[in-house]
């Protein structure tokens, strides 16, 4: 009987990474997860954490060595590890550059030495800045804050390893992923975590501006499926935008979650609409989104207790937490 192929997932105990682990195990892979558990949760791996096909290594990716034993024999590497959020990146740019750029280089070198067949980098649509929509892959790059810059530089490094060392890579620029297991702790950030905790506390949703801004939400299992296809295709050296291709307003989300609203000031550097042009990934990989927005929100709602321990944000605490956002991004 042939041995199962091995995949490595960095950040595999995190939001998207844990769904990637699910997908790979379902597809018959053995999986090595590298996750420091600073942002991820071992519980996100569910019953899998005792699975003989799963190994969890609790290291920071910056501790990976070129000849790391955890990477040995790997067929594919899916690189999700890193740190997110806008405000902390403005306040701690060195840490963001270290984790998201140097960290990526450590993973690339380890993958190169292991001779992996495919390296897939989780990039961010934030690289486009205030983009025209729908946004194609050849849109001008214009990062607005250090998080966006760090993710883009990780992408540049990935393509550099492809060019110089012939490492087979593909890059996916994720727009607005949402779903079960999305992050619950740390800085003020993604709208779902904020709203779900407010819902549990019977408090009004803190809607930025008038709520007509649109986001290209894509359910997390659709994200994992796209990454699996990017890791198993013969194509290499590609970049794809990944979104639902059907932007939803924040007001529509509020309607589905059903609650009262309080409005807070619109923030500088945030687009009125994110909208991925997904024709390239449809054509190249035969991928298309499968989970409608209403269905995705229902799945989250069915798991709302997951957000019980998340930070509870109010207009006052949000104002305090986003001071540096307005200070640095509002003066240009």
Image (tube, rainbow, N blue to C red):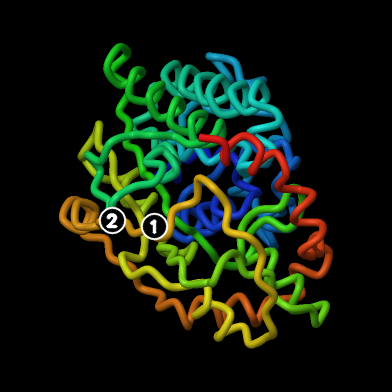
Residue 213 position within the rendered picture, expressed as x and y whole percent measured from the top left: 46, 66
Q: Nearer the viewer, residue 88 or 181?
A: 88
Lower sequence index among marks 2 and 1:
2
Tell me the distance, in whole angstroms, between the alpha carbons under discs 2 and 1.
Answer: 7 Å
- Residue at coordinates 47% horizontally, 58% vertically from top-left? 176
Answer with left or right where residue 161 lies relative to residue 309: left
- Residue at coordinates 57% horizontally, 66% vertically from top-left? 209
- Residue at coordinates 62% horizontally, 44% vertically from top-left? 85
Q: Nearer the viewer, residue 172 or 139?
A: 139
- In the picture of the structure, the residue carrying the numbered disc 2 is 133
Residue 281 position within the rendered picture, expressed as x and y whole percent measured from the top left: 24, 53
Answer with left or right where residue 253 lies relative to residue 261: left
Q: Quadrant of residue 224?
A: bottom left
Res. 274 mark: 1
Q: Secondary structure at mark 2?
A: loop
Res. 102 mark: none
Circles 2, 1 touching at the beta carbon (< 8 Å):
yes
Residue 175 position within the rendered picture, expressed as x and y whole percent measured from the top left: 42, 53
The correct choice, above or below, for 327 with respect to 277 in the image is above
Count residues near mark 1 (Cα–Cα under 10 Å), then give few for <14, some for 14-19, many for 20+: many
Q: Secondary structure at mark 1?
A: loop
Count residues near mark 2 (Cα–Cα under 10 Å), then give few for <14, some for 14-19, many for 20+: few
Q: Is residue 265 visible?
A: yes
């Amino acid at each position: 009987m042939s041995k199962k192929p091995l995949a490595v997932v960095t950040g595999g105990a995190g939001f998207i990474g844990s769904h990637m682990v699910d997908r790979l195990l379902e597809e018959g892979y053995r999986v090595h997860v590298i996750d420091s558990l600073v942002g991820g949760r071992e519980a996100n791996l569910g019953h899998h954490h005792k699975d003989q096909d799963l190994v969890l290594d609790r290291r920071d990716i910056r501790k990976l060595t070129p000849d790391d034993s955890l990477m040995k024999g790997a067929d594919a590497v899916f690189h999700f590890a890193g740190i997110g959020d806008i405000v902390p990146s403005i306040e701690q740019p060195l840490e963001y550059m270290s984790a998201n750029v140097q960290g990526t280089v450590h993973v690339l070198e380890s993958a190169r030495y292991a001779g992996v067949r495919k390296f897939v980098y989780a990039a961010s649509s934030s690289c486009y800045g205030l983009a025209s929509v729908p946004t194609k892959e050849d849109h001008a790059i214009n990062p607005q804050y250090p998080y966006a810059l760090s993710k883009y530089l990780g992408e540049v490094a990935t393509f550099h390893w492809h060019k110089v060392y012939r490492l087979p890579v593909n890059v996916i620029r994720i727009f607005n992923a949402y779903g079960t297991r999305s992050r619950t702790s740390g800085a003020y950030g993604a709208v779902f975590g904020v709203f779900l905790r407010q819902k549990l506390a019977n408090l009004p949703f803190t809607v930025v501006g008038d709520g007509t801004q649109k986001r290209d939400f894509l359910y997390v299992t659709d994200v994992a499926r796209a990454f699996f296809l990017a890791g198993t295709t013969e194509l290499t050296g590609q970049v794809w935008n990944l979104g639902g291709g059907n932007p939803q307003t924040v007001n529509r989300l509020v309607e589905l979650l059903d609650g009262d609203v309080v409005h807070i000031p619109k923030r500088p550097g945030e687009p009125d609409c994110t909208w991925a042009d997904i024709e390239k990934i449809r054509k190249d990989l035969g991928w298309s989104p499968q989970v409608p927005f209403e269905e995705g929100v229902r799945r989250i709602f069915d798991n709302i207790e997951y957000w019980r321990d998340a930070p509870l944000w109010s207009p006052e605490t949000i104002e305090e937490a986003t001071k540096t956002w307005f200070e640095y991004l509002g003066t240009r």
